[in-house]
């Protein structure tokens, strides 16, 4: 199969998964982001990379956003929101972060492929991205390597959330561009 055909497979799989999203869950996450004092993101592996992109866009929106584990990340507090990404919903490190955030009084949310997972169970809000990466559905879920579809959808979903937050806050592209780094 040529690279162009593989691209079509990836796009098709993403579109199928995105079509199945629960719009109420997405709106609830937008509400949480807009209402938060500050937003923290966490995860591991490629899920964390996707959420780092979200943190950057939130900063461009003028929202204080931090990545858990970075040296300049402040203490989380009541009024803050901790957003995790975990395809499996079982990542112990992510579960520990969410439990710690909740203990400190922060609201917690997870984007996961498994809404009935341990990570989802400890959160105030779970957004299920229908791109399962574990269990009996794995062989039929995607032609891609395990986790790729979830991570691709995670980036698409968080970029869509950013567009909704932009609209809700009345933020323009020019305002976001003004907050973009000038040190490149």
Image (cartoon, grey):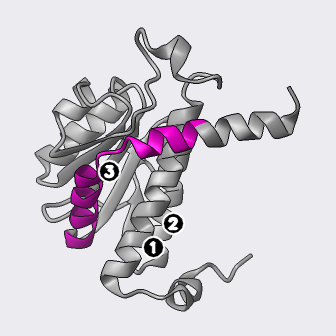
Q: In the rendered image, which residue does mark 2 sit on?
A: 56
Residue 108 is tagged as none
Region rendered in magenta? 13-35
Residue 172 x/y as whole percent: 48, 88
Residue at disc 1, secondary structure: helix
Q: Residue at x 34, y 57 (%)?
A: 40
Q: Quadrant of residue 98?
A: top left
Q: Quadrant of residue 28?
A: bottom left
Residue 21 percent coordinates (x, y): 35, 44
Instruction: Residue at 43%, 45% (x, y): give it.
Output: 19
Percent x, y of residue 67: 43, 55
Q: Which residue is mark 3?
A: 83
Whether residue 175 is visible here, answered yes or no, is yes
Left or right, 52 with respect to 80, comes to right
Sequence-wise, the earlier of marks 2 and 3 is 2
Instruction: Give me the C-alpha separation between circle 3 and circle 1.
Output: 15 Å
Q: Report the residue marked by disc 1.
A: 59
């Amino acid at each position: 199969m040529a690279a162009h055909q593989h691209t079509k497979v990836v796009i098709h799989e993403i579109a199928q998964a995105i079509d199945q999203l629960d719009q109420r869950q997405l709106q609830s996450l937008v509400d949480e982001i807009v209402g938060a004092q500050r937003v923290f993101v966490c995860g591991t592996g490629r899920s964390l990379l996707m959420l780092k992109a979200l943190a950057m866009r939130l900063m461009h929106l003028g929202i204080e956003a931090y990545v858990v584990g970075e040296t300049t990340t402040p203490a989380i507090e009541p009024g803050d929101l901790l957003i995790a990404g975990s395809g499996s919903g079982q990542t112990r490190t992510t579960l520990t972060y969410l439990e710690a955030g909740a203990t400190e009084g922060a609201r917690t949310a997870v984007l996961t492929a498994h809404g009935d997972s341990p990570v989802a169970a400890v959160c105030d809000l779970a957004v299920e991205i229908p791109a399962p990466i574990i269990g009996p559905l794995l062989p039929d879920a995607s032609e891609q390597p395990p986790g790729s579809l979830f991570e691709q959808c995670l980036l698409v979903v968080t970029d869509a959330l950013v567009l909704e937050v932009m609209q809700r806050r009345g933020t323009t592209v020019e305002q976001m561009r003004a907050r973009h780094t000038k040190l490149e």
